[in-house]
Image: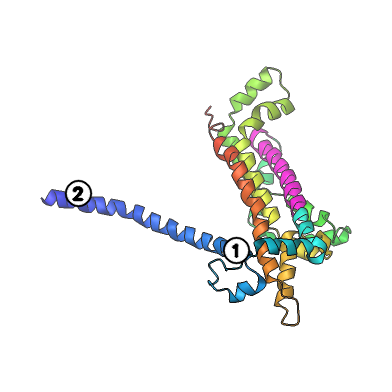
Amino acid sequence: MATATKANRAHAIKGSPRVFTTVVLILACIYFLVPVWWLIVAATKSNSGLFFGSNGPMWFDKNFALWSNIKQLSGYQDGIYWRWIANSFVYALGGGFLATAIAVMAGYGFSKFQFRGKRAYFNIVLGALMIPATALVIPIFLLMSNVGMTNTAWAVLLPTLLNPMGVYLMRIYCMQSLPDEMLEAARVDGAGELRTFFKVSLPIMTPAITTVFLLSVVGAWNNFFLPQVVLTNQRLFPITVGLTAWQVKSQAGAASEQIWNLVTSGAFLSIIPMVLAFLFLQRYWVGGLATGAVKS
């Protein structure tokens, strides 16, 4: 009897961490999903419904105004919202693609080639990870000002091309999942370095490349402080800076134009591309993990 009691107590102690983990995960899900739910609900409300809605801030109003809000978005200030969306696509996809290409080549080089100063250069990359991106905004602004690139798209694109985290991730992945013996076999068969990289290494690196590309695109899409500092022309704004300008305009007071419904519906539409990007690229991310699981 005593033995059974001890066994039950041990089982209860062993099971408690699982319960604790489940509770923490549920609380984390609520913490992250509640703002998203509020945004979805707010995007369907009119300007008055946001403040005087009959069902409260966390549920839909009787007047479903999403399509009306989208129509107003398309006409407000000559449809500049869609220009901001297009700018964000250019900054995110262009900068994300080039940043990923540089990170892939740099990480592959650090992992598979020996050259003078390799350790010192990689330590510089690791040091760059410790510097907050916001701390570099003012130096970047001064540099862009000296070369006459402020208030141009290049002032936003060029700084996003350097992704130290991407270089680090690619180096670690190449070291763990890309055997040197495979590369040597390709070279023995007569393949040059470029052919070895594109035909042998690149397919195995697909999961890591997808990860770095997603991180780069999301980082560029959400970039706010740098574009706000280096850009003054509204037609060059990304969606983050543009919506903030509308929010400031709505907060200016009763005498200013209240466009909170455009801010909320515009914010809701702006997150859809990132959600779709994750959903479509997830299969390459997860499905390619087995490809990288090659042991030497």
- Which kind of residue does numbered mark 2 sit on? Ala
Quarter of the image where one finds residue 224:
bottom right
Residue 114 visible in the snapshot: yes
For residue 17, side relative to residue 160 (left or right): left
Residue 7 badge = 2
Earlier residue among tags 2 and 1: 2
Residue 158 badge = none
Badge 1 density bin: few <14, some 14–19, many ≥20, Cα 10 Å: some
Badge 2 density bin: few <14, some 14–19, many ≥20, Cα 10 Å: few
What residue is shown at x 68% (from left), y 33% (from top)?
Answer: 113
Could you tell me residue 268's position as x and y percent? 64, 60
Could you tell me residue 98's position as x and y percent? 75, 44
- Name the residue at the front extreme: 62
Quarter of the image where one finds residue 118:
top right
Between 246 and 259, the residue placed more toward the observer is 259
Q: Give the range drawn in magenta.
A: 88-114
Question: Secondary structure beneath disc 2?
Answer: helix
For residue 17, side relative to residue 258 (left or right): left
**In the displayed structure, would residue 87 be above or below residue 176?**
below
Question: Secondary structure beneath disc 1?
Answer: helix
Q: Is residue 148 magenta?
A: no
For residue 148, side relative to residue 110 (left or right): right
Q: Determine which residue is flagged by label 1.
A: 39
- Name the residue at the right extreme: 148
